[in-house]
Image (cartoon, rainbow, N blue to C red):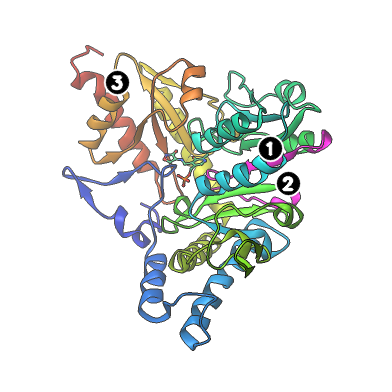
Amino acid sequence: MNKYIEDFPALNQEFNGHRFVYLDNAATTQKPVSVINAIDDYYRKNNANPHRGAYALSVKATELYEGAREVVRDFIGAEKSKEIVFVRNATEALNLIAFSYGLTFLNPGDEIVISIAEHHSNLVPWQQVAKAKGAELKYLYLNEEGIIPKEEIESKITSNTKIVSVTQVSNVLGTINPVKEIIEKAHSVGAIAIVDMAQSVPHMKVDVTSLDADFAVFSGHKMLAPMGIGVLYGKEALLEKMPPFLCGGDMIEYVWEQKTTFAEVPQKFEAGTQNVGGAVGLTEAIKYINKVGIETIEAIEKELTSYALEKLSEIPHITIYGTKDAAKKAGVISFNIDDVHPHDVATILDSYGIGIRTGHHCANPLMRYMQVNATCRASFYFYNTKEDIDDLANGLKNVRKWLGYGS
Ligand code: 7TS
């Protein structure tokens, strides 16, 4: 056991007669009581439409919402809170960049460079925009460890490249990509660099300013906050020159019959009533993460990952994908068991109270590149324990026996 578990009610349950072992943290994390209470408190005492009313309650809601922006700014090392745009999730943030920046500034023949390990949310929008603008979508492929090698960065990012968009941590392999080098290379050819931080911000110290990322995106729900609140970080000068993505209330300055002038950033990108309760939850989530310490979180997960790699490697008939060096990975492990469909693995583990994810993990091109249809994926957060990993390993040892194989 570790001291964090008692803060997470959803982890203190039993399924199928076993204590619950939650190993699907790359999909979403569980929420601590402090976050649940902060949201409850918001709806009991502080709920109003922000930015709109002159009355006390609306002012309170506005303060909470704008306060969250400052908390996020500090957490990711952005220079200005106006560079923080609230969205629903990483997916919406990436669509916003693709359809606002991409549609406006790309020209026929321009190249967009992404990696083969991207989640569909950092891939499909670029396909759409490339098609609309006559641009070309190019891929950085991975080495045998599942990491983007230097040669790919050097050869694929060229003077034709206008946008580079890569994930910092793969949601399938857990591998950490050299985003600083990628950003530097992008800037050296005059391209902008976008970093998908959905799998990194919750787990490791990230500083968008020292990375010099032009845009960064992540989702609150993968870092203890509720679903429905996410973040787009963008350099002020870029956000200023981009057209709005969604139009309507709150994002305007003046509206006439035939034209509109827009609000300043970030309001220009926050059309309609915003998710204040979500922003309150995200504030509290960041407070919780800061209390534990992001370095402590990273260290706990490194140790768990290293232990899990060791335990899983000892089991016959298991193939682990990507590097087996915990130093190069975040807490995500993809694997398969010989002759067993991943869904059968997950169903058998579920009978022991263990929750893992199986399938293509919204990364079809990566699955094809790895020549698999699907994988099993265990992903950790700081509230996981070595006992959880022992349970996973013991469950996995039984999978082939359950299905009638001799060993
Ligand atoms: N980018 C990465 C790297 C992700 O892992 C995910 C979600 C997203 C973007 C999209 O995040 P969303 O909050 O907008 O959905 N990844 C996963 C996953 O691995 N399993 O479920 C969701």
In 3D space, how far apart are the residues under numbered discs 3 and 1 (Cα atoms)? 34 Å
Where residue 405 appears, as percent x and y from the top left, is 22, 13
In 3D space, how far apart are the residues under numbered discs 2 and 1 (Cα atoms)? 8 Å
Marked residue nearer the N-terminal end (3 or 1): 1
Horizontally, residue 333 falls left or right of residue 259, namely left
Within the magenta stretch, is there residue 199?
A: yes
Residue where numbered disc 3 is placed: 341
**Disc 2 marks which amino acid?**
Leu
**Disc 3 marks which amino acid?**
His
Horizontally, residue 136 falls left or right of residue 309, namely right
Where residue 335 appears, as percent x and y from the top left, is 41, 25
Tell me, for residue 179, which label it has, or none: 1
Determine the secondary structure under disc 1: helix
Near-viewer residue (147 or 349): 147
Where residue 148 appears, as percent x and y from the top left, is 65, 26
Residue, x 61% and y 22% (percent of image)? 142
Whether residue 375 appears in this view of the structure is yes
Vertically, is 233 above or below 153?
below
Q: Residues within 10 Å of mark 1 (few under 14, many from 20)?
A: many
The answer to whether the residues at label 2 and label 1 have Cβ atoms under 8 Å apart is: yes
Residue where numbered disc 2 is placed: 211
Marked residue nearer the N-terminal end (3 or 2): 2
Residue 186 falls in image quadrant: top right
Magenta span covers which residues? 187-213
Residue, x 38% and y 23% (percent of image)? 374
Residue, x 57% and y 44% (percent of image)? 94
